[in-house]
Image (cartoon, grey):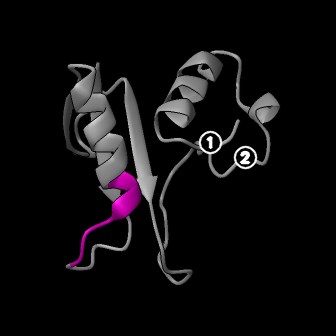
Amino acid sequence: MRIGLFDVDSHNFPNLPLMKLSAWHKSRGDTVEWWDPDDGRYSIVYASKVFTESVLPATLIVKGLKTIEQVPSLIKSQVEEILVALEVEV
């Protein structure tokens, strides 16, 4: 899989959620790189922001869902696998 990472805040400090996702995907043999908005060939693009004033320009966002049941069925198994690997209670 080809994974894109988008640090919405663009500050000069590490983005821990993106770092964890990157490490997990790399351990599975996936290609991980910074998201290029002109390149639409990603399997998944993760965007992460810490500050409320940062604006996330997007047409479709699956974000911060409260339960796994809310995740679209197309990606539910992948999300469950990621959450287990990151030791997040499902």
Separation of disc 2 and disc 1 at Cα?
A: 7 Å
Residue at which label 2 appears: 65
Amino acid residing under circle 2: Leu
Q: Residue at x 26, y 40 (%)?
A: 23
Q: Position of residue 75 (x, y in %)?
A: 59, 21
Where the C terminus falls, by quadrant? top right
Amino acid residing under circle 1: Val
SS at mark 2 in the image: loop
Q: Is residue 4 visible?
A: no
Determine which of the numbered discs, if any, sits on residue 62 in the image.
1
Q: Quadrant of residue 80?
A: top right
Pick the front one: 50 or 81: 81
Q: Position of residue 29 (x, y in %)?
A: 20, 19
Q: Which residues are magenta?
A: 13-18
- How many marks are shown on the rendered structure? 2
Q: Is residue 39 visible?
A: yes
